[in-house]
């Protein structure tokens, strides 16, 4: 008899939570602090060509205040958060020839990687716009994932990570209902991924930092949720999908260097990196 076999996140957890925030603005520091206090992890998508010059403050009342490179380093350097690309100059990629799109992606990556001494393997589409050629260019530039703005209102683990859809924006009217559903769903079978996106300057503009404070307290510190960046989840799901299974579904091999967790017939187990397990029938 074939056995059911579902993805479980690291530690055997059935649920994961991730955040994606764009543009590298000053309010990112306050948002990162909220994440830090509640054990949450985010991916911050930055434009390497748009950092504000040092010693050149924003005029009073400027709504979108990008960080200086030094502020960005102070906010994100050495933290659990991930740096993502968002294009060197925040251009409309689908309006540009592929060569220019490649320059926007690669030069952004190169600058951010140099700044943070890390690999920048994914990010978010500026303006959320794309076409088929943009996706091919991203692939050619070595991108592992790229987030759109097309909310799903659901918790499915994405199939195509180069067109990575979020669950919703933090200002979505369904946020409360989705949060309650995510927390109460027993997730006995399929895993759940709650993926929120936005811009931190929106909390300042809307005067609703309390919304994120409450949300972070409600979703943070829970044993049944895996807190991870976009890239960590992308890599983990790739490792799960690389598992090899025998025809009768009983033997599972893990050829990767990542321990992979699963649920089978209501039991949770792990296939350690580089090993093979026999599932209990
Ligand atoms: Zn943006």
Image: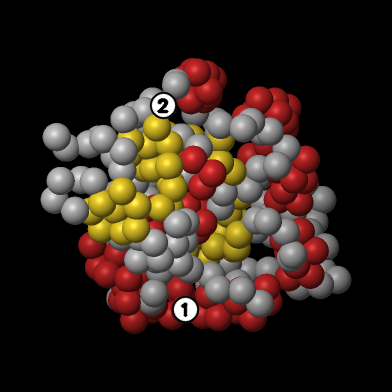
**Left/right of residue 103 with respect to residue 20 in the rendered view:** left
Q: On the image, which quarter does residue 238 sit in? A: bottom left
**The N terminus sits in image quarter:** top left
- The residue at the point 66 percent across, 43 percent down is 40
- The numbered mark at residue 32 is none
Who's the residue at 22% across and 36% down the image? Answer: 3
Q: Quadrant of the C terminus?
A: top left
Q: Quadrant of residue 132?
A: bottom left
Q: Label 1, on which residue?
A: 106
> Which of the marked residues, 2 or 1, is nearer the chain's N terminus?
1
SS for tag 1?
A: helix
87 w.r.t. 82: above or below: below
- Location of residue 266 by image quarter: top left
Q: Residue at x 72, y 48 (%)?
A: 32
- Relative image position of residue 39 (x, y in whole percent): 70, 42
**What's the distance in space between the residues labelled 2 and 1, CA to CA?**
39 Å
Instruction: Please name the residue that numbered disc 2 is placed on.
Output: 187
Residue shown at the point (73%, 37%) measured from the top left? 38
- Is the C-beta of the residue carrying label 1 under 8 Å from the nearest atom of ligand 1? no
Query: Is 76 on the left or on the right of 243, as rendered?
Result: right
- Between residues 247 and 118, which one lies in front from this camera angle? 247
Residue 225 higher or lower than 101, as above or below: above
The reply, left or right, for residue 176 in relation to residue 132 is right
Q: Secondary structure at mark 2?
A: loop
Q: Is residue 207 above or below residue 177?
A: below
Q: Nearer the viewer, residue 25 or 39?
A: 39
Q: Percent from the top left, x then y, of residue 90?
A: 51, 64
x and y, in percent, of residue 222 in the image: 64, 31
Please state if 203 lies on the left or on the right of 168 as rendered: right
Q: Residues within 10 Å of mark 2 (few under 14, many from 20)?
A: few
């Amino acid at each position: 008899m074939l056995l059911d076999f579902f993805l479980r996140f690291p530690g055997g957890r059935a649920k994961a939570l991730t955040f994606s925030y764009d543009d590298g603005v000053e309010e990112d520091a306050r948002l990162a602090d909220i994440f830090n206090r509640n054990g949450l992890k985010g991916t911050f998508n930055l434009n390497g060509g748009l950092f504000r010059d040092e010693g050149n403050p924003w005029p009073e009342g400027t709504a979108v205040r990008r960080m200086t490179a030094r502020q960005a380093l102070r906010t994100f350097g050495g933290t659990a958060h991930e740096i993502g690309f968002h294009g060197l100059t925040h251009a409309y990629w689908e309006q540009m020839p592929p060569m220019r799109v490649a320059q926007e992606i690669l030069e952004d990556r190169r600058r951010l990687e140099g700044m943070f001494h890390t690999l920048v393997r994914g990010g978010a589409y500026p303006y959320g716009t794309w076409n088929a050629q943009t996706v091919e260019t991203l692939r050619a530039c070595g991108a592992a994932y790229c987030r759109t703005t097309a909310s799903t209102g659901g918790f499915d683990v994405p199939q195509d990570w180069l067109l990575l859809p979020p669950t919703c924006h933090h200002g979505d009217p369904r946020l409360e209902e989705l949060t309650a559903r995510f927390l109460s769903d027993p997730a006995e079978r399929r895993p759940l991924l709650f993926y929120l996106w936005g811009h931190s300057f929106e909390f300042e503009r809307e005067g609703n930092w309390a919304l994120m404070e409450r949300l972070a307290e409600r979703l943070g510190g829970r044993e049944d949720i895996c807190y991870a960046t976009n890239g960590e989840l992308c890599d983990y799901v790739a490792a799960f999908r690389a598992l090899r299974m025998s025809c009768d579904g009983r033997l599972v091999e893990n050829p990767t260097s990542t321990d992979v967790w699963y649920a089978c017939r209501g039991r949770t187990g792990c296939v350690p990196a580089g090993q093979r397990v026999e599932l209990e029938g």
